[in-house]
Image: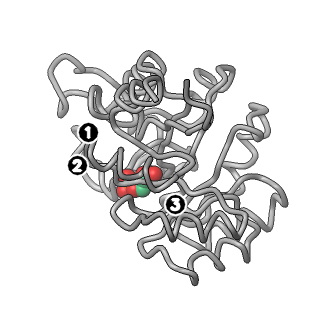
Amino acid sequence: MNERYISNLAHRGASEYAPENTMAAFYKAVELGANGIETDLKISRDGVILLLHDEKLDRTTNGTGKASEYTWAELRGLDAGSWFSPRYEGERLVELEQFLHGFGAKSLHFALEFKERGIEKQTLEMIRAYDVKERVTLTSFIYEELVAARAIDADIRIGYLVKTFDEQAIEQVKAIDGTQICPRCSQLTPENVLLAKSRGLEVRAWGVADEEWMHHALRCGVDGMTINFPDKLAASLGKS
Ligand code: G3P
Ligand code: CA
């Protein structure tokens, strides 16, 4: 029996099996045993927070250009599933409100990643409206956006996504009273994980390319990871 709680966050939903950041991928995540979902936040031209990873719509929808160039009414009509498989034709982009409406009541954790500046206030309002604050970690590579979120909310969980996992990054997380440091999996060592933990931080990995890297992260002692195949992590934790 595994005594250690590992957060198994489906990365953009169970994105190995269904088109990322769609309701299909989020339902799949729950079905496959994830205990949380990671997703990416952007804003439409008319101020609707939606879930999209890329800078542009081109790779994962039949639209082109940036989401911020379109209204939500225009964006919601796009096909966000066919690029992945014809089976998912008609799958739509998802707005944050729809996501929280569908999944907020389940006992899941949510890692919400700010992909741009200036969306923290609206996101926090939505989190409060759906009463999910205790199960949310706000994350970003954009440090200033996390600083802005902290200025509004003194105790919400914050995770800083870092490209370099070193003492300086750890201190940056401490400076905004962050909960987590989130390094790329390939940067993890047992030593730097221990160092972050000795500073009172959780360590949550990203960029877990395959099962070998998943086991590397577990061996290094992480508290969790975002992963495209949460079923494999769930199976591995069940076995340990
Ligand atoms: O878990 C964080 C991870 O999602 C960051 O990378 O590019 O997939 O948003 P990206
Ligand atoms: Ca992300």
Q: Are marks 3 and 2 in contact (CB under 8 Å)?
A: no
Label disc, if present, on residue 61 of the rendered structure: 1
Q: Are marks 1 and 2 in contact (CB under 8 Å)?
A: yes
Identify residue for label 3: 182
Q: Is residue 69 visible?
A: no
Q: Would you name the residue on which mark 2 appears?
A: 58
Query: Residue at the spot x=52%, y=60% of the render?
Result: 182
Amino acid identity at mark 1: Thr
Q: Is residue 146 positioned above or below 28 on the image?
A: below
User: Does 82 sit above or below residue 124?
Assistant: above
Q: Nearer the viewer, residue 239 or 162?
A: 239
Front label number (1 vs 3): 3
Residue 204: % across, % down: 53, 53
Answer left or right for 131 relative to 106.
right
Q: Is residue 102 above or below residue 54?
A: above
- On whether ligand 1 comes within 8 Å of the CB at mark 3, the answer is yes
Residue 111 position by quadrant: top right
The N terminus, quarter of image = top right
Where disc 2 sits, the SS reads loop
Q: Quadrant of ligand 1?
A: bottom left
CB-based contact (under 8 Å), mark 1 and mark 3 = no
Q: Please, what secondary structure does the residue beneath circle 1 have? A: loop
Dot label at residue 173: none
Pointer 1: residues within 10 angstroms few (<14), some, or many (20+)? many
> Horizontal placement of 203 versus 90: left or right?
right
Mark-to-mark CA distance, 3 and 2: 27 Å
